[in-house]
Amino acid sequence: MENHIKLTMITPEKEFYSGDILSLNTQSDEGVFGILANHVPIISQLKPTVTTFTDVNGKKLKAFTSMGVLRVLKGEVEMLCNACEWPEDIDAERAKRSEERAQKRLKTDDKVNFNRAESSLLRSVMRLKTKG
């Protein structure tokens, strides 16, 4: 049995990451979960979060991952995300401004705007958490 799994992270604009890893931790609508080698096949809807993974050399990596879909099948993990960002690429000031706008929009009675604001707030908070 293999002790690693191939990870591919793709956004609409590019292939963000591709390589062999030992483990991955991310979050779906059902909560935080981990993936190791020989994981059972699954498909899961992803939430914006800080996704962490360890490459085969033991290097621990983290990235902001937005909404998307994860599939595990035959020793491969595919993450299709609206956005992925390394901590050093996150604009903290922009994320803070987005968080502030979302907080203001949450006070509206309009359900559509409330849902959009809630999603925006979660993305902003997770970007800032990834940035550290």
Image (cartoon, rainbow, N blue to C red):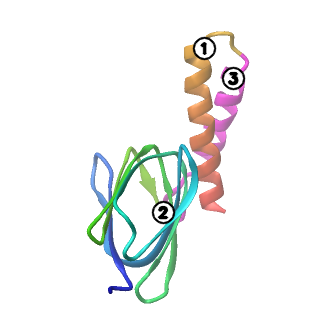
Q: Earlier in the sequence, mark 1 or mark 2?
A: 2
Question: SS class of the residue under badge 2?
Answer: loop
Q: Which residue is mark 1?
A: 111
Q: Which mark is residue 14?
A: none
Name the residue at 66% across, 63% down.
132
Label 1 is placed on what type of residue?
Lys
Separation of residues labelled 1 and 3 (CA atoms): 9 Å
25 over 38 or under it: above or below:
above
Instruction: Report x, y in % for residue 92.
Output: 61, 51
Instruction: Report x, y in % for residue 15.
Output: 28, 59
Question: SS class of the residue under badge 1?
Answer: helix
Name the residue at 69% across, 23% down.
106
Label 2 is placed on what type of residue?
Trp
Res 25 visible: yes
Name the residue at 58% across, 23% down.
115
Q: Which residue is mark 2?
A: 86
Look at the image and give the residue range highlighted in magenta: 87-107
Q: Earlier in the sequence, mark 2 or mark 3?
A: 2
Label 3 is placed on what type of residue?
Leu
Instruction: Report x, y in % for residue 1.
Output: 32, 86
Instruction: Please state if 55 lies on the left or on the right of 50 as rendered.
Output: left
16 over 104 or under it: above or below:
below
Instruction: Please state if 35 lies on the left or on the right of 102 as rendered.
Output: left
The quadrant where residue 96 appears? top right
42 over 98 or under it: above or below:
below
| In front: label 1 or label 3 | 1
11 over 106 or under it: above or below:
below
Res 92 visible: no
Q: Which residue is mark 3?
A: 106
Separation of residues labelled 1 and 2 (CA atoms): 32 Å
Pointer 1 local density, CA inside 10 Å: few below 14, some 14–19, many at least 20: few
